[in-house]
């Protein structure tokens, strides 16, 4: 029998975890990615601050991908039934397509190009210059504290009308607010538009348009079922994982490597089951902690319930920084060694118990367009 063909769009945390896992299942896997390197996204705030070079935040895909995985450099712009078209007109066919394009788009901190450009802008600022960091979430706090540690001569404003880290517990927010004040970072609801700006207000994903009524969230994320598949006219060949996808009935899931890694491995497992004609399994991923860096030797670990809501337990200071560094190193290494039994907590109990899906014969129709920012 012919070897099943799978295309994975994107070589981030989810894409690499899925591709490497599929390569161990006697499946021919091809990864499509615009650049020949993996971007360690959770290090990009250090790139902006100047404490890490852009090159140190990347790893060659020749090192990250299993040797059995094929790599095609290019930007996917259109996905039609069992086929992916690249920006330069090349086309690739496959039995299954997994969209794991991530959210590293735009000019903000979450994209490699954006972080590299911001690094140059920050380096050119004179002493005493004001900088406003837009967004007081985890990314904004990490950028602000990294800048304060690297450039104490700058006047840094963390700007967010919603306030500081609304998703964290009161004790955590109080500790972080004290740390920001100690390092000279102010937290304000607004700031002058004329100041140099670092955008940290969430992630940007590729936007999807379809002539087959595929479910797409208002933000552009592909809505997938609990098994990470998208039923196209009752058939299962299209899948989504990582930041570019949102799972129905899983409102607690946040964007980030803590979600992308287990979902990449789960997508590979369900694609394998689908290829074998077996029923797919719903995924339910939970959390154990939220980590935020507060400078080169400081951090905060907020321990959470499986639905990501905060508990009363915190870890701070140098011990938290050690844990945070360990988490970062694990996130970089984990995609290279994925497994069906990827260690991630289970999420909150699922009361809906939806039926699993099975594979149906492929047909040649329908399309999905991917428009890159």
Image: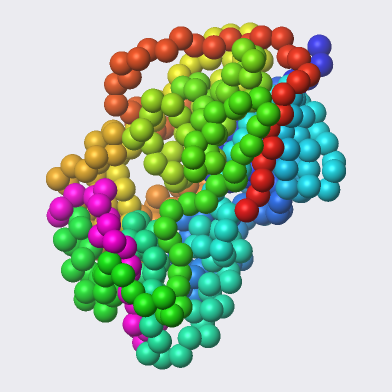
Residue found at x 15% / y 53%: 170
Residue found at x 61% / y 26%: 213
Residue 287 visible in image: yes
Task: Point out the image quarter for the N terminus.
Answer: top right
Residue 310 pos. (x, y %): 21, 43
- Looking at the rendering, the stretch of residues picked out in magenta corresponds to 149-171
Horizontal side, residue 60 vs residue 195: left or right: right
Residue 228 pos. (x, y %): 52, 25
The correct choice, above or below, for 291 with respect to 51 in the image is above
> How many numbered marks does the figure carry?
0
Residue 23 visible in image: no
Q: Is residue 153 magenta?
A: yes
Horizontal side, residue 370 vs residue 278: left or right: right
The correct choice, above or below, for 307 with respect to 71 in the image is above
Horizontal side, residue 4 vs residue 279: left or right: right
Residue 253 pos. (x, y %): 38, 36
Magenta stretch mostly in which secondary structure? Answer: loop
Residue 366 pos. (x, y %): 72, 24
Tell me the quarter of the picture where residue 25 sits.
top right
Nearer to the camera, 204 or 55: 204
Residue found at x 20% / y 55%: 172
Colouring scheme applied when the structure was drawn: rainbow
Residue found at x 26% / y 48%: 167
Nearer to the camera, 84 or 94: 84
Q: Residue furthest bottom?
A: 127
Q: Is residue 167 magenta?
A: yes
Tell me the quarter of the picture where residue 324 sits.
bottom left
The correct choice, above or below, for 178 with respect to 324 in the image is below
């Amino acid at each position: 029998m012919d070897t099943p063909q799978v295309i994975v769009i994107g070589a981030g945390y989810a894409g690499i975890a899925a591709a490497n896992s599929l390569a161990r299942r006697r499946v021919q896997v091809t990864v499509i990615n615009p650049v020949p390197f993996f971007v360690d996204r959770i290090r990009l705030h250090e790139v902006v601050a100047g404490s890490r070079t852009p090159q140190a935040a990347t790893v060659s895909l020749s090192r990250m991908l299993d040797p059995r995985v094929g790599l095609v450099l290019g930007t996917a712009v259109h996905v039609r039934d069992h086929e992916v078209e690249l920006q330069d007109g090349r086309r690739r066919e496959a039995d299954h397509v997994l969209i794991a394009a991530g959210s590293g788009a735009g000019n903000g901190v979450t994209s490699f190009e954006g972080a590299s450009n911001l690094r140059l802008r920050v380096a050119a600022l004179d002493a005493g210059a004001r900088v406003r960091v837009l967004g007081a979430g985890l990314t904004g706090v990490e950028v602000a504290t990294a800048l304060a540690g690297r450039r104490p001569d700058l006047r840094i404003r963390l700007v967010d009308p919603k306030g500081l880290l609304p998703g964290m517990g009161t004790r955590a927010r109080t500790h972080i607010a004290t740390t920001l004040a100690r390092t000279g970072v102010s937290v304000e609801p607004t700031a002058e538009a004329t100041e140099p700006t670092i955008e940290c207000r969430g992630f940007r994903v590729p936007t999807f348009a379809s002539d087959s009524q595929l479910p797409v969230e208002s933000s552009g994320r592909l809505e997938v079922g609990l098994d990470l598949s998208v039923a196209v006219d009752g058939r299962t060949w299209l899948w989504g994982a990582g930041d570019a996808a949102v799972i129905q009935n899983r409102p607690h899931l946040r964007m980030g490597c803590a979600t992308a890694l287990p979902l990449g491995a789960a997508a590979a497992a369900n694609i394998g089951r689908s290829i074998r004609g077996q029923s797919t399994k719903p995924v339910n991923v939970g959390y154990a902690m939220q980590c935020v860096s507060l400078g080169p030797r400081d951090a905060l670990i907020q321990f959470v319930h499986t639905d990501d809501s905060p508990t009363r337990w915190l870890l701070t200071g140098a011990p938290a920084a050690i844990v945070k560094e360990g988490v970062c190193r694990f996130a970089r290494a984990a995609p290279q060694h994925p497994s069906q039994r990827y260690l991630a907590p289970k999420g909150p109990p699922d009361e809906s118990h939806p039926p699993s899906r099975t594979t149906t014969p492929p047909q040649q129709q329908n399309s999905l367009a991917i428009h890159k920012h």
